[in-house]
Each structure stands twice: as C-alpha cells, then as structure tokens.
Amino acid sequence: MSLDIATSVRLSSGFNMPLLGLGVFRNNDCIPACLAALKHGYRHIDSARVYGNEADVGEAVRRSGIPREQVFLTTKIVGYEHGYESTLRAVDDSLKLFGVEYLDLFLIHDATSGRAKRSETWRALIKARDAGKLRSIGVSNFNVNHLEEIRSAGLETPSVNQIELQPFCQQRPIVDYCKQHGIVVQTYCPLIKGQFSHPVLQEVARKYNKDVSHVLIRWSLQHGFSPLPKSEKPERVVSNADLYDFEITSEDMAKIDALDMGKEGAVSWNPIDVS
C-alpha cells in the first residue's frame, strides 16, 4: 500500500485532508511540537476549543513560514458550548484565536448536550460553512444513533467522525456505518496512551524493526483511518512519522485486528453511548 506523509483523503465537502495529523490535546505549550511537525512534513493539526491552545497552533503555523492554505486546521466545540447562536459565536472566536480567515474542519466534539442542542449546533455549523468560515464540518464521539439522527432530520452527512480507535477498541459498528455513508473516520488515542506491552504488538514491531508506535499508526493508515498521534516532545513527533518505509502484511494486520476488546478496550473519554 503506497503511502507517504502527504497522503490525503477527499472529504465529502470536496476538500482534501492529510491522513496523518498531529493531536495537541493536553499540550499547554504546543508551539514546539507543531513547529517540529510542520518542519518534517505534517500538514494537519487537530485542536479543540476546550484544549485552550488554538492561538498557539495558529502562531506555530505563522512561525513555520508554510502558507496557510497548505496546513489543514481542525477544531471542535464541546458540549457545554452547544446551541445555535453559541456555536456561531464559537466559530468566530476560534477564527480569531487561530488568527485565520477560515478553518478547514470544525467538529461537534461530543454528543453530550442532547438531541435538540446537537441539532442546533449542526445547523449552525452548516450556516458557518456556507458563509465561508469553515471548509468542512463533522462530528466527534458520535455513535450510529447520533449519526442517524442527522440523516433522519434531512441534514447533510458529516464529512468526518473522530472517535477513539486503536487495536483494543475498534468501534466496528461505527466504522462500518461511516464507510457506508462516506464519512471519514479519524482516530484519537491511536497510540493507546503508550500501552505497548502486548505480545502481538511487540512481535509485529520486531518483525519490521520498528517501534510499536509506528506499527499502531501504520495499522490505522492501512485501514484508511486518519490517525492523530499526540506528543509534547518534538523528537517524538518527528519519530511518529517514520512509518512510510514498510507495510504491514495482511496476516499481521489480521493479528492486530484480533486484539479488539470492544468498549472494554477504551483508554480515553470515549463518550459514545450518551443519549
């Protein structure tokens, strides 16, 4: 499978999104990590309003010297900010914080606000997108029922659903639904918070003379997902992209696939089952 750091996927909005992205969750000084990523070929950075570092991401892009249009920027609106008018204000606030005229992807961060607020928020994002403030819109931590809720309302399907997805928590019903409806699956916690001791992961890593982190990200890419590994350490950010000189065989992919524990394998928030 031919992949490189520039490999992108076409979103339903018509824009291309680089598959590999840098996550900046819980990084209160993310400029060094972002600069290292951009210097070494990353062109996709994933932030969120609740992370409190949108301004730093924007500053890193400017410092990098890379033209704004070559960097794919994502943010998200968390449940307590949901609502029509509050979402429109949040979009404008995020644009100001990033210091940009548009954002490439804006996600509903979670479904915790309830059906009515989710619908208002989605309609507001459509309006902001139609106004040119956003290029693509999507969701995060949405299960099949949440996604069906949007479809049954006659509203357009999200371009992206960002969920926890790693070998121990593969969320297959959500992935299957997304594939059926043209929704790109982004994966947070692709490195399972450093829980690398499983014998299968160790075995596969040794076979390819790679770190377990490389195997995990490569596994995600070969499934067609968009992984968002995070690190505060610039050297680790660079190392995480050293995964384009090998390909995991179908047999080894199957071994990793067999590690799925369903919801029991989650290592993060993963608020999939809220009503």
Image (cartoon, rainbow, N blue to C red):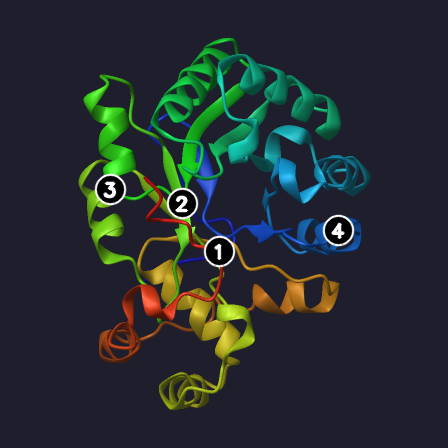
Q: CA distance from mark 3 to mark 1?
A: 18 Å
First in sequence, mark 3 or 1: give its number: 3
Q: Residues within 10 Å of mark 2 (few under 14, many from 20)?
A: many
Q: Amino acid at mark 4?
A: Cys
Assign a secondary structure to mark 3: helix
The circle drawn on residue 30 is: 4
Residue 99 at x, y = what percent?
A: 74, 25
Q: CA distance from mark 1 to mark 2?
A: 9 Å
Residue 212 relative to residue 96: left or right: left
Comparing marks 3 and 1, which lies closer to the viewer?
1
Q: Nearer the viewer, residue 124 or 117?
A: 117
Q: Which residue is mark 2?
A: 141
Residue 165 relative to residue 154: left or right: right
Q: CA distance from mark 4 to mark 3?
A: 33 Å
The circle drawn on residue 144 is: 3
Q: Amino acid at mark 1?
A: Trp
Assign a secondary structure to mark 4: loop
First in sequence, mark 4 or 1: give its number: 4
Residue at horizontal 46 percent and vertical 65 percent from the top: 217
Q: CA distance from mark 2 to mark 3?
A: 10 Å
Residue 65 relative to residue 49: left or right: right
Q: Nearer the viewer, residue 55 or 33?
A: 55
Q: Is residue 198 visible?
A: yes
Q: Which residue is mark 1?
A: 269
First in sequence, mark 2 or 4: give its number: 4
Q: Residues within 10 Å of mark 1 (few under 14, many from 20)?
A: few
